[in-house]
Image (cartoon, rainbow, N blue to C red):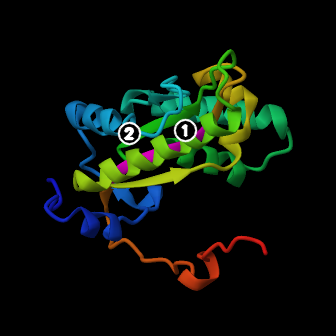
Amino acid sequence: MLNDLSSPLSLLRTRRSGKPRDLAGPGPDEPQLRQMLEIAMRTPDHGKIAPWRFVIVGSDQRDALAKLLESAYRSEKPDAGRAEIDSMHQFARQAPALVVVLSSPVTHSHIPLWEQELSTGAAAMNLLHAVHAMGFAGGWLTGWPTYSDAVRDAFGKAPERIAGFVFIGTPSRPLEERPRPDYDSRVSTWRAPS
């Protein structure tokens, strides 16, 4: 199921995010998911402190996650309508595999928090590259569950934060290319001030 790794630049150029609601089976098996996460951990990490964690939410735990999201959402928004609650359930049950990526700062370290958070983002991106390299698609979602303390507390504790939910599976439809930034609008060449 591996893509052609003989052309790493082609691999990087072809990675696309998959909409988690459009990711179907098969998903990665346990050894494949482990390999993806081992690759994700090969990320820039100033001080070698691993300021991130990954929590796998198994398919047998998706109903429990849906109940957790509903409960946490209702506690924050007691007047939530059925459509809002249904969206929490749908969020929890999409795609065959789910990895919660946590920023897990090492507070006693001299490494600045910003650098630790950047390392977390890099680890999540490495996970998405590994997913693609192994022939699957991934979608990194944030949204309300990412910022809920009650949801975070089900996976860790402060000062940890959820960096995102990475859903993994097989695209049920072709992945869409999205518009990319114009090179000249994002890249410049520095010149020393005179």
Closer to the camera in the image, 5 or 111: 111
Q: In the rendered structure, which segment of residues is drawn in magenta? A: 163-169
Q: Residue furthest front?
A: 194
Q: Residue at x 61, y 34 (%)?
A: 116
Percent of width and height locating residue 55: 47, 27
Q: Is residue 165 magenta?
A: yes
Closer to the camera in the image, 117 or 3: 117
Q: Residue at x 54, y 81 (%)?
A: 183
Question: What amino acid type is highlighted by mark number 2?
Answer: Ala
Which residue is the site of mark 1? 120
Q: Residue at x 39, y 53 (%)?
A: 138
Image quarter (top left, top right, bottom left or bottom right) of the C terminus: bottom right
Percent of width and height locating residue 47: 53, 26
Whether 141 is drawn above or below 102: the answer is below
Question: What amino acid type is highlighted by mark number 1?
Answer: Thr
Q: Main secondary structure of the magenta part?
A: strand
Disc 2 element: helix
Task: Write down the quadrant of residue 132 in the picture.
Answer: bottom left
Disc 1 element: helix
Q: Residue at x 35, y 44 (%)?
A: 96
* Pointer 2 local density, CA inside 10 Å: few below 14, some 14–19, many at least 20: many
- Specify which label sits upstream in the sequence, 1 or 2: 2
Q: Is residue 190 magenta?
A: no
Whether 49 is drawn above or below 129: the answer is above
| Residue 110 in the figure: left or right of residue 180 | right
Which residue is the site of mark 2? 40
Percent of width and height locating residue 193: 77, 72
- C-alpha separation, residue under disc 1 versus residue under disc 2: 10 Å
* Pointer 1 local density, CA inside 10 Å: few below 14, some 14–19, many at least 20: many
